[in-house]
Amino acid sequence: MSKSVKVKSFELFAKDIAEIDVELLHGLSAGVGWPHRSADWDFLRSVGQGIAAIDGIGRVFGSAMWFPHGSDFATIGLVITTLRAQANGTARWMMEEVMNRCAGRDLSLNSTKAAYPLYLSLGFVKEAGVSKWQGIVGSDRERLRSWASEAAEMSEALLNEIAAFDASAFGANRTTLLGALARGAKLRVLRRNGALAGYAMCRKFGPGEAIGPIVAVSDEDAIDLVAPLLADLSGSLVRVDTRESRGIFTEFLKRSDLVVTETVTTMSKGRQILNRTPGRPWIYGLAGHALS
């Protein structure tokens, strides 16, 4: 695997993303209109690995990250190239480097429309669409009534319980990621007969708040988890990334004054990651495009 790529009159090299000034990474994502703050980059680097494409004087022309879950699965995200590098094979070179470093793992990512042909050519297949619902939350009084879910503080015992519930929906163990997400996040849990029946988190991301992951067995349970979080965020900018395209959950998001502002495509290489079974936990809200 080549460790560099020629871009017009200069050469780009792969460097560990942990060694890159976070403000350069923030400038990279801002340059393509992505909402990540420097704090978001710091968090993602703390839970994942990645490379940056730099030139001989340290300028950043691209990035690509991967987030391992267990020994045989990883999600890929933050695949960004500057406009100057987009037409010169930089994204393919970075993806090939990532796949080389993730050899032996099944992979999943969420693709923009522009990147979709590249991922197809690298052997990824389409599984589902993802809609980003975003907006200033309204003050619908329906959300202010008492809901079945309850606020919770993450403990080691609860983390293990949530991780086991989550794994049955996600298909891999995300204990480390979930523990990291919970720090500084609001957490809601739903129980039936003492057993965990769903959970949701809300945390700061980009210019507002992001609600996710949301893992539940039914639309009604997902609403019970999300509703009190939205009630606390009336007047705030909120996003929910979901693969739901219809039903009462998306109708609920619409009544909360959120609208679809972007769509991406979940793709996989290796095993199929989305296996919905009635009566079993399902991911109603992603942790993020890069984290799924």
Image (cartoon, helix red, strand yellow):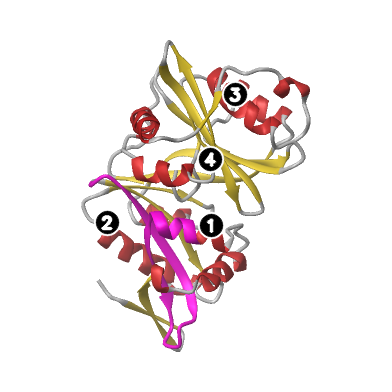
Q: Earlier in the sequence, mark 2 or mark 1?
A: 1
Residue 223 marker: 3
Find residue 25 and report its horizontal and vertical position in percent. 52, 69
Decide which of tag 3 and tag 4 comes sooner along the chain: 4
Residue 281, image x, y percentages: 41, 24
Residue, disc 2: 102
Position of 31 relative to 262 (above/below): below
CA–CA distance in space, label 3 to label 4: 18 Å
Secondary structure at numbered mark 2: loop
Whichever of labels 3 and 2 marks the residue nearer the N terminus, that label is 2
Lower position in the chain sequence, tag 4 or tag 1: 1
Which mark is nearer the camera, 4 or 2?
2
Q: Which span is picked out in magenta?
A: 42-71
Between discs 3 and 1, the one toward the N terminus? 1
N-terminal-most mark, 4 or 2: 2
SS class, disc 3 = helix
Amino acid type at mark 1:
Asp
- Residue linked to disc 1: 40
Say left or right for 254 vs 123: right
Question: Quarter-wise, where is residue 177 in the image?
Answer: top left
Instruction: Name the residue carrying label 4.
Output: 130
Q: Is residue 19 depicted above or below 263 in this figure? A: below
283, 195: nearer the viewer: 195
User: In the image, what residue type sits under mark 3?
Assistant: Ile
